[in-house]
Amino acid sequence: MQHKRYRPVLLDYILLAFIGGSILYFFWKLENELQYEWRWATIPQFIFKNTNGTWEPNFLLEGLLTTIRLSIWATILASVVGVVMGLARVSQSCFARMISRTYVEVVRNMPPIVLIFISYFFLSAQLTRYFALDTMVQDLPSWLYSAISILFNKPSQLTQFVTGVITLGLYEGAYITEIVRGGVNSVQRGQWEASASLGFSRCDQLRLVVLPQALKVIIPPLAGQFISTIKDSAILSVISIQELTFQGLELMASTYLVFEIWITITMMYLVLTLGCSVLSRRVERALEWKN
């Protein structure tokens, strides 16, 4: 199926002119009335640092990499939770449906910051008490130590990182649960009846007939949920996880480069999320062409 190319209308040009004018007015207001002195030349040193002739990530780029790691691991966990709970939502078991619906309603109607603090003060304490993740990795071989630093986070921040992944995964998992439920329910009832007439069990009906068809409905919004996870990860800065927003707040407190750092952080988030949006649209079109 071919998509028609969108042609801008007059209202689009008016909105673009309004947005552009607002941005120009904002900068004019800063320079002329607030006498703000721009210091963009200092920003690159917060992105990269030169150590013995080698360029390495500095505060902002390290924060962006931590945001990417958080989003990937949280999405993996959320997908597992969402698939399990989503299938429970369409289960024939009343108990399974009750558990999954309770999970969805509680998480989706709770402010995320409340969930983060509950998880941090309870879950983080349990991880520290029973597993001592931060100290456990100190005794690992150097190659495994480096691998953990690359795949997860600095060992000194491992407990906070794992807590953040679990919290964000549970929060996003509630939305993925509804995505999975909607995808399964989009499959025509006749597919269930036809597979049942062939003698398939309920599990085989889902695995062999229903889920392959539902995936075409599930994958596009699932890609959008990954973008949402990237944006939602910023709230984890309240528990001192050194992701992009936290690093930016720390830099602003020490340098007073408020607008330069906020604009830089905004552009870094935009590059990341817009890239994911382009990729998700390509995946969605590929699935449409296979229909």
Image (cartoon, rainbow, N blue to C red):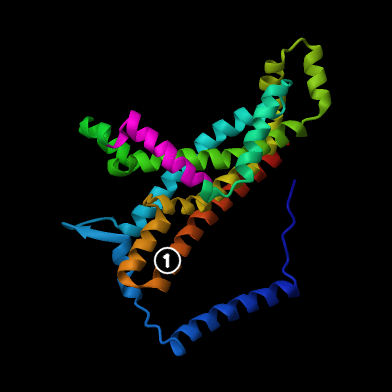
Which residue is located at x 34 percent, y 77 percent?
A: 39
Point out the image quarter for the C terminus. top right
- Above or below, 276 relative to 79: below
Point out the stretch of residues depicted in magenta.
Answer: 115-134
Looking at the image, residue 22 lies above or below residue 276: below
* Residue named by callout 1: 264
Q: Quadrant of residue 203?
A: top right
Tell whether 266 sits left or right of 63: right
Residue at x-position 70% and y-position 41%? 289
For the point 36% across and 72% down, the residue is 257
Residue 128, visible in the rendered structure: yes
Looking at the picture, how far across and down is residue 37, in whole percent?
Answer: 37, 82
Q: Is residue 73 visible?
A: no
Q: Is residue 32 left or right of residue 134?
A: right
Query: Which sits in the foreground, 67 or 251?
Result: 251
Q: Nearer the viewer, residue 45 or 90?
A: 90
